Image: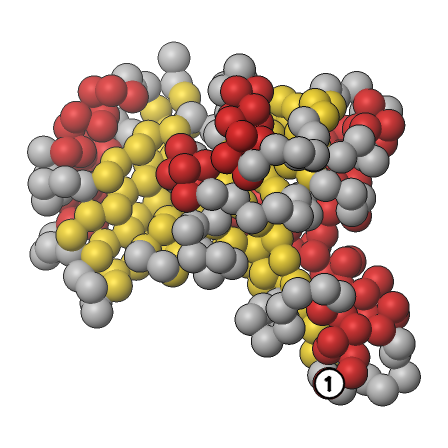
Amino acid sequence: MEKRARVLIDCEDAKGLVYKISKVFYDRGLNIDNNREFVDKEHGRFFMRTIVTGVFDIAELEAQLHTVVPPEAHIRVIEPKDKKIILMVTKESHALGDILVRHAAGELGAKIQCVIGNHETLKELVERFDIPFIHISAEGLSREAHEAKVMAEIDKYRFDYIVLAKYMRILTPTFVKAYAYKIINIHHSFLPAFIGANPYKQAYERGVKIIGATAHYVTDDLDEGPIIAQDVIPVNHRLSWRDMQRAGRDGEKIVLSRALALVLNDRVFVNGNKTVIF
């Protein structure tokens, strides 16, 4: 039976890779519907994302591709289908609400397995969409003890990504390592210039002319993981800090939505502390 797949290749650069890879597809009678490639010349890395259709076995196709690319290449052949995500939240509803609405409308491209919150503030909102809400309070617990409980719940589910929809707790290296490059965060773009409480008020008092948001993978370096999507919003002296906060929250949910669309459609490659996006 004919099927469609995304072929993702990340490897050391070498001459003739596009030809050799394309020949594998041709020899197996596969049609290339779309193809993008990029070479990071500074680091000698090759990236390629190809959409193919035809009759094939995924394991066999991956094995054949490995014969024409450099050793240690990362190859994934993925049939397009909705992925599974877990959301983590605290009290702010804007990012969560946007994702829930897109999910309900069938626009998200993913199934929400559950929402985990360290407060019960958003429980009622989540349950309106018939999605499980799991409250795990951090009260009286060390960060490690709290995360152990969170991880115990997460590991009950099959999932592709964990989305921090304004989850306002710093994750430990243990947690980050357990789900390496599977955690996506959204934050205002003031970091590191405006750190701490009420960054929008700090920005207002400094007289900034733009505000924005950044979606990125979570790493052990706080808010410095590979960036997936960003955007900025012009502001001026007429706006109060609360106006800036409202505009910034709109920006955050839009940028998070863009980042999820890219990741869920397998358009993002991690390249060191940067990303290659097709």
Residue at image location 24% in from the left, 39% down from the top: 74
The amino acid type, in three-letter code, at marker 1 is Arg
Asked whether, in this view, residue 269 is left or right of residue 126, the answer is left
Residue 177: where, in percent of width, then height?
Answer: 38, 38
Asked whether, in this view, residue 175 is left or right of residue 236, the answer is left
For the question of whether residue 253 can be seen, the reply is yes
Residue 153: where, in percent of width, then height?
Answer: 57, 20
For the question of whether residue 258 can be seen, the reply is no
How is this picture coloured? secondary structure
Q: Give the number of marks.
A: 1
In the image, is residue 238 above or below residue 74? below
Along the line of sight, the residue nearer the viewer: 105 or 31: 105
Place residue 164 in its image quadrant.
top right
Asked whether, in this view, residue 268 is left or right of residue 132, the answer is left
Residue at image location 61% in from the left, 46% down from the top: 169
Residue 266: where, in percent of width, then height?
Answer: 45, 40
Name the residue tied to disc 1: 206
Place residue 96 in its image quadrant.
top right
Place residue 116 in its image quadrant.
top right
Residue farthest to the front? 140
Report the quarter where the N terminus lies.
top left
In the image, is residue 200 above or below residue 179? below
Residue farthest to the top? 1
In the image, is residue 157 above or below residue 137? above
Residue at image location 87% in from the left, 68% down from the top: 242
In the image, is residue 152 above or below residue 190? above
Q: Mark 1: few, some, or many residues within 10 Å (few <14, many ≥20)? A: few
Residue 111: where, in percent of width, then height?
Answer: 63, 25
Residue at image location 74% in from the left, 76% down from the top: 202
Along the line of sight, the residue nearer the viewer: 24 or 169: 169
| Secondary element at image label 1 | helix
